Image: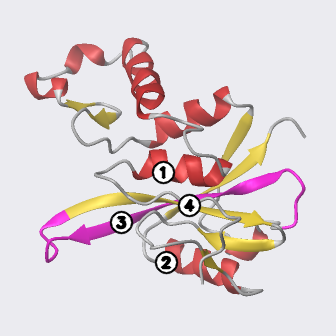
């Protein structure tokens, strides 16, 4: 049963980072495609390696695909830091239970998982938000039909599975606390 009090955007093209950020902040258009594109363009302008571009760099930009989205972690970090959020990369050598899910400064968790589509011919990565709303943790994966609540200890188990499968875990803290 879908909880109407939990904001959840569905996947469109490869804009999973856009959807993951809006799901994390629990607000429609908290971030827009134009805003993420502008952040990506600024990262390019500030890049000391931009002299190594190829003609394909017009479409496959260093920090996102101009046609479909598919933004990278640099865009995520810059976007959240602009909103006074702190991104902490979870040390995968540690069990996910080392993340204090009750920390008042913890806004949520973003994960980046490897995915295979089209019978395994297309390999990519996918951004997913996890967020606690009204005391319940939710998987806000934009590929899901709606928010999926976790039971008590499932969050750490889920994160350990993500890490075991080659995923990355980023802890998002509210910098204003």
Q: What's the residue at 90%, 55% (across, down)? A: 104
Spatial separation of the CA atoms under disc 3 and disc 2:
11 Å
Q: What's the residue at 70%, 50% (across, down)? A: 172
Q: Do callouts 4 and 3 mark residues in contact (Cβ within 8 Å)?
A: no
Circle 4 or circle 1, nearest the eye? 4
| Front-most of residues 76 and 141 | 141
Color theme of the render: secondary structure
Q: Earlier in the sequence, mark 2 or mark 4?
A: 4
Magenta residues span 102-122
* SS at circle 4: loop
Q: Earlier in the sequence, mark 4 or mark 1?
A: 4
Vertical placement of 116 versus 19: above or below?
below
Q: What's the residue at 38%, 12% (across, down)? A: 45
* SS at circle 1: helix
Label 1 crowd bin: few (<14), some (14–19), many (20+), radius 10 Å:
many
Q: Position of residue 152 (x, y in %)?
A: 77, 86
Q: Which residue is disc 1 drawn over?
A: 19
Q: Which residue is disc 2 drawn over?
A: 164
Q: Is residue 140 left or right of residue 81?
A: left
Label 4 crowd bin: few (<14), some (14–19), many (20+), radius 10 Å:
many
Q: Position of residue 153 (x, y in %)?
A: 74, 86
Q: Residue 8 got which mark?
A: 4
Q: Position of residue 14 (x, y in %)?
A: 31, 50
């Amino acid at each position: 049963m879908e909880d109407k009090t939990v904001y959840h955007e569905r996947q469109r093209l490869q804009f999973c980072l856009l959807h993951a950020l809006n799901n994390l902040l629990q607000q429609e258009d908290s971030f827009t495609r134009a805003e993420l594109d502008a952040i990506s363009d600024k990262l390019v302008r500030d890049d000391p390696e931009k002299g190594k571009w190829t003609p394909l760099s017009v479409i496959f930009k260093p920090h996102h695909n101009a046609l479909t989205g598919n933004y990278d972690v640099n865009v995520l970090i810059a976007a959240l830091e602009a909103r006074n959020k702190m991104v902490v990369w979870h040390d995968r050598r540690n069990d996910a239970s080392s993340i204090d899910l009750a920390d008042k400064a913890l806004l949520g968790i973003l994960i980046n998982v490897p995915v295979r589509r089209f019978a395994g011919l297309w390999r990519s990565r996918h951004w997913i938000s996890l967020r606690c709303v009204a005391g319940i943790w939710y998987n806000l994966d934009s590929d899901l039909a709606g928010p999926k609540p976790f039971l008590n200890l499932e969050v750490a188990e889920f994160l350990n599975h993500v890490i075991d499968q080659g995923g990355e875990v980023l802890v998002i803290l509210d910098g204003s606390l």
